[in-house]
Structures are given as structure tokens and as C-alpha cells.
Image: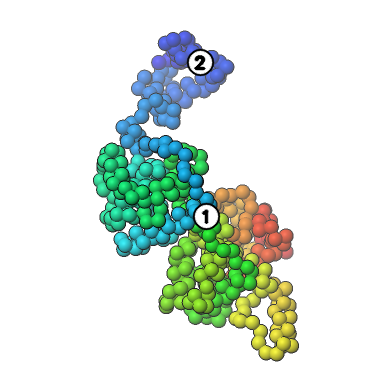
Amino acid sequence: MSFDEMMDLFRKGFPGLSVPPSKISNQDLRGFWRVLDARRIGRVPVYEFLVFMRKHGAEWSMHKSPIEFRNKAIVEDLGPPAERSDDECRHIAHRLDSNLSDYWSRRGIHVRAVEKWEKFLAEADGSNNGRITFRELEYALCVKLKAKRNTAFDGPMSAAAKLRQLGEYLQDGFVIKGVSHDDLYALWCRVDASGSGQVTHKEWTLSIYRLWLEMWEDCSLQDLGRAVDKISDAALKFIGKSKNWYKVFNIVSLGAGSIGYDEFFKIVRRPLPCLAVPPSSLPDTELKGLWKAMDADRSGSISVHEFMVFMRRLEGRRGLSQSRRGGPRGTNAQKAQAMMEIARKSKVRPHLNPAQQERVKASLQKLTAEDFANAYAKWEIPWNDFVSDWEWHRVIRELLEISEEDLDDEHVHALWSKLDKEKHGLVPVAAVIELGWCA
């Protein structure tokens, strides 16, 4: 095919495509031909044209492979759901989550809290496309949680065979104990708000977690402070007398860099080598309230940066800048004097000594805004030309490569306070870089 023949194909009527210049200009067609005729020989063989079009136009192709048809899930319209209140949906989500935890324990497989639904749904995803339909979910719950079959999912089964098997499991009207077919479908419709008939594994996981998280009570500042003190005091057995929230987090997360709610509760409650904080000392309501306050983005997982920022902000709200163990003791006058001293110290921020200042400046002077953008891309964090207090500790340790020996966590926080004087939680990257050139 020559250029003129291609123009005829696009412009002329049947059997041509009849595409007018108002839709594709002649200039665009000439540009298209230049890309198409990569060898610059003035003609393009038919097979090269077909390969080019299928490669660059796959999204709009009329040709579908058998694998695509096989992986396409069948979405069934089951009509409107039964009415369930917000509280009922939360209790349904909680029952499902508890049963799923039992399922993994029964199989003897340790699965992190943030992964237990995604792993289960990945096994249940018959179309293997990262999305699941209501029927796929219901079938998986019946087979694995109700029938208590611990092995992996069976091999390929026809849709009709699965439907017959599902009917047998649902004869009593329940998917699992305490959750009926109508309950599950009402919850499903809440998660699938768009009515597409499919949800991604992550959508389902986060929706379930957020629903039953709403059942937990919010804690007062006093209760949060008490819970934090109990955990900190228990952690001092491992890290020594100096409170260091980074080290505390490494203990409760077992050095994983992030922690889910299940792991957090187990590490706080279990005996050595865990923290062994009993419910008599730290009630479940306060522990749950603490987790709810820390997981501000409702992701089901807390990173070391989230933990550090939360603890620093909580200390600020409580009027503390130094660690404390218990309240002041002695007479009322002595207690008042001690509280005045604590208040005085809380207003005094730690200052960087000349060696620390030079260390920070030397690291910042090597960086550009592009270096920050590349680092955020590597960390899979959206970049918008601002550094937030959530990532500040990571910027210091990983991007600036300043160790705790050179700059401890107290001074990392002090440096941020100097940058973020207005307490916005965000600082332009230009201001951060400029710090490296300040006198």
C-alpha cells in the first residue's frame, strides 16, 4: 500500500472508510504515514499495516482472544438488595472478618491483617482478573468458611455445577453462621456502589475494614495518652530508659516497616517477647480507640511514618516534648512545681548543634526538586512539589541518608518544626532545599 492508496482508503466511500477531514486532517494522516512507513520505502506491506494497527489499537480492536473471553466474569443481575441498617452492615462485616481469620488459622497459614481478604479473594477469583462478582464471593465463602474445607479451591467447574453446589450450601438460607444470603447481598451492594456487578479485591478489603472500624469508639485525649503511656512503658523493657518512638514502632511492628491491626493487638497483648500489656491495664476499648486514631487514612495498616507523626502530634496536644513516666509525685506544691517545669520544658525545642546543621546542609546541597520527585516515585507516593510531615522522617533517613547517630528522632522533629512554622503539615520542596543554603 502506498501513501496515495492509504489516503483513498481513509477518504473514499465504501469500501473505503469515508473519514472526512473534519475528523482526521490531512496533516494528521501524513504524520500517521510517516510513522507507519518506518523504513522510508514509500510502500507498506499489508501484514506490516495489520501488525501496526493491532499493536497500537489493541484497546479498540474488534478481535478478542479465547483467553479474554474465558477471563471475562459473568455478571448476574440479582435485583435490589434487602434493607439493612448501617449498624447491621457493620456487624455483618465483622462476622465475615472474624470467620475469615478463623479460616486462615485453621489452615495453619499466617496472613497479615491487611492481606487476609486479598489472598482469599485471589483464590476465589475464577476469572483471574483482579475483580470478583457476588456469585464468586458467595460460593467461596460457602465452600471455605461454611463447609470448612481447608484445601485450595477445586479445579475448573462449570458455572452450572457451581450453581448447583451453591444451592446445596444455601438450603438453610445462610452463607456462614450469622450471615444470610440477603445479608451478604446487602453488604455487597453497599461496597459495589456503582452497581457494576464487580469489585476489586482491594475495594472489598478496605470496605469491610472501614465498616467494622466504625463500631469502635473514639477515645478522648486523656484515654489516648494513657494507652500510649502503657505501650511506651512496656516497650522501655526492650529499648532502655530513653523514649524513642521509632524504636517503639520497630518493636510493635517486628521491624516490618508497617503493621496491621491484628498484628498490633497481638504484639501489645501477648507475653514475652511481645509487650504483654493486660486488659486490666489497657482496656480493649482504649486499645481499639488508639488504633482508630492512628489509622487516620483508614487503610488498615500503619507505616513507621504515620506512627511517628501521630505520636509527635499527640505529645504536642498533651503539652509534652520530653518522655515522662507517670505523673509528678510528692505534695501538691511539689506536683505543681513539677508540672510547671514540664510545661516550661515543653516550650523549649531541641536545637541542632553546628555539626548537625552542617550535616543537613551538605546533604541538601546535593539535591534538586527532581531528586525528591524520583524518590517519591520510588516510594510509590504521589508527588506534588510538597514534602509532608508524613514522609519527613523517610526523607531524612533515606533520601538525605542521615543516620540516627548523626541526627536522632528528636532533632528530626525539631528540624521539621523549623520548616513548618505554620503547622500546615506541608512544606514546599523549594523551602526544604533552600534550608541547605541558609546561613
Looking at the image, is 362 positioned above or below residue 237? above
Query: Residue 93 at what x, y percent from top left?
Result: 46, 54
Q: Determine if residue 397 is in view.
A: no
Q: Distance between the residues labelled 1 and 2?
A: 57 Å
Foreground pick, 90 / 305: 90
In the rendered structure, which disc, 1 or 2, sits on the residue that comes first in sequence?
Answer: 2
Mark 2 surroundings: few (<14), some (14-19) or many (≥20) residues within 10 A: some
Placement of the C terminus among the 4 image quadrants: bottom right
The quarter holding residue 399 reads: bottom right
Q: Is mark 1 on a helix, strand or loop?
A: helix
Query: Residue 158 at what x, y percent from top left?
Result: 27, 39
Q: What element carries label 2?
A: loop
Q: Residue at x 61, y 53 (%)?
A: 368
Which label sits on residue 19?
2
The quarter holding residue 402 reads: bottom right
Farthest residue toward the front? Answer: 172
Foreground pick, 37 / 189: 189
Farthest residue toward the bottom? Answer: 331
Placement of the N terminus among the 4 image quadrants: top left
Direction from residue 225 to residue 17 in the image, left or right: left
Direction from residue 49 to residue 343 in the image, left or right: right
Foreground pick, 8 / 154: 154
Q: Which residue is drawn at 45% across and 52% down?
A: 205
Tally the marks.
2
Query: Residue 380 at what x, y percent from top left?
Result: 51, 51
Foreground pick, 15 / 291: 291
Q: Which residue is drawn at 36% across and 54% down?
A: 176
User: What residue sits right under mark 1 in the picture?
Assistant: 87
